[in-house]
Image (tube, grey):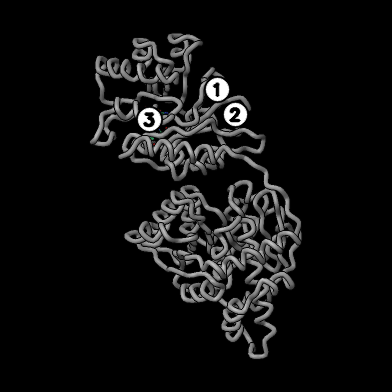
Amino acid sequence: MVDYSCYLVTDSSLVHHSRNLVDTVQQAVDAGVTIVQLREKELETGAFIELARKLLEITKKANIPLLINDRVDVALAVDADGVHIGQDDMPLSIARRLLGNGKIIGVTAATIEEAKVAVENGADYIGIGACFGTSTKKLKKIPMGPRGVLEILEALPANAKAVTIGGINSSNAERVIRHSHGSDGRKLEGVAVVSDIVAAENVPEKVAELKQAIARGFINTVPASIYPDELKLKVAQVFDKLRATSPLVHHITNFVVMNDTANATLALGGSPIMAQNIEEVHELGKFVGSLLLNIGTLNNEFVTGMVGAGKAANKNRTPIILDPVGAGASSLRKSTMKLLTDSLDIGIVKGNAGEISCLAGTGEVEMRGVDSVGGTNDGASMVTRTSKLEKSVIAMTGVVDYVSDGHRTYSIHNGHEYLGKITGSGCMATTAIACYAADDLLVAAIAGLASMGVAAEYAAKRSDVNGPNTFKAALIDELHNLTAEKLLQSLKLQKC
Ligand SMILES: Cc1ncc(COP(=O)(O)OP(=O)(O)O)c(N)n1
Ligand SMILES: Cc1nc(C(=O)O)sc1CCOP(=O)(O)O
């Protein structure tokens, strides 16, 4: 059985200046890559064969396969373990005739049709790409993201094997593999990586990081169900922990709500930092407990900062909470949401019904500006479906709030109509979720929405509240006055 899980594809033009390609492959193999493909675009045949012989010596000692990119003649000359061919290379049937059945043949596919034809014609595995953008190769098509990879995978027979390639690195490999877990239990065999390994300063460290990320991606545990009373106790526990630890919540958020969300973070017990400049997000990333991305008022600086901070957060395993404000309202917002969900591992997405339906791609709930027009008749199934699709916890706000991790779905029946009469209450709910995100993400999403809902009920009851404006001030006060006991007493939580 071939192990495709950590697949190194070479490119000597990208090798770090401190080594040559042979050293790089030796180090990567020693660190545990499971298969190597020699991919050289500029080498003459003689030099290609010489290099292939050197790499074959390394891979044979480690008992892993060496494949040759495009060049069936070189594979035959050195008796390599097989080839990887693209759509414009030698046809699969001829390559098979020349190499015989004992050799591995991989074929690149960018569409369902290409993948199906390759499998029908006997490809041993499919290289699905490009998953993400890459500077290693000029791409002919827009990257398909993890969702596009899953669509191709699910169209193939259950026993077909596939890896994905294009922009894979140690900070997104876990998400890419996890995202490929299909409804029928199938998944990718692994990920193929060029620059993240060959250009790395420290190859063994990089391969170790990648292997850990890949291993995490393959873990497919179905979480145990939790009864609402047990969950309420967990909410009370995480509230006490929040007050004791005061985690730093990094916001890249819109300027309409920035001040209110910073105050809501402080009132609930977290510590806010608002920073979007790419020059500082990496430095800050080392210290924050969670990263909140809110697309409410977009410009290029915000988007660059979000992607940069998001990648750093994924690398540091810091949870990301996304608020796709008004995602269905314009193409810019929709494409930004797609960019973020495709390129980052998002822990929790919080949105109203319109935003969540836009994320799911169903458009079943319309948007007017940043607001949903109406709701959905079946919020529970909408969040469960979207969570399964996105592999993120989904928190959907409305008259009733719904939270799901794809396996467990709950509804929260707290709040007050004034929440819909002030700007930024949805963004504050996302902030509340981010304050709890150091813990289990399902619990965090419920605790955040519960805190907002219960604080809103206490605020609306106050004698000094006469309308939306006084309510907003009272809401910040009541987030500050919240206690674990109040949450336990007032939280109305149901299992769906
Ligand atoms: C594992 C894997 N998947 C896809 C490719 C791309 O191959 P190809 O289409 O032949 O393009 P080039 O590599 O020749 O640029 C690959 N090499 N490996
Ligand atoms: C060789 C290759 N094939 C692709 C495809 O889409 O078929 S993308 C790609 C380059 C992948 O390089 P990196 O890991 O550095 O992003």
- Disc marking residue 156: 2
Q: Quadrant of the C terminus?
A: bottom right
Q: Secondary structure at mark 1?
A: helix
* Residue 187 tag number: none
Image x and y of residue 221, in percent = 64, 42
| Horizontal arrangement in the rendering, residue 232 relative to residue 103 (left or right) | right
> Which residue was labeled with disc 3?
28
- Image quarter of residue 139: top left
**Of helix, strand and loop, which one carries label 3?**
helix
Estimate the x, y position of residue 191 in percent, counting from the top left.
Answer: 47, 34
> Regarding mark 2 in the picture, which secondary structure is present there?
loop
Q: Amino acid at mark 1?
A: Val
| Label 1 crowd (10 A; few <14 / some 14-19 / many >=20) | many
The reply to whether the residue tagged 1 has its Cβ within 8 angstroms of ligand 1 is no
Residue pictured at 59% horizontal, 65% vertical:
241
200 relative to 69, above or below: below
- Are circles 2 and 1 on residues that touch, CB within 8 Å? yes
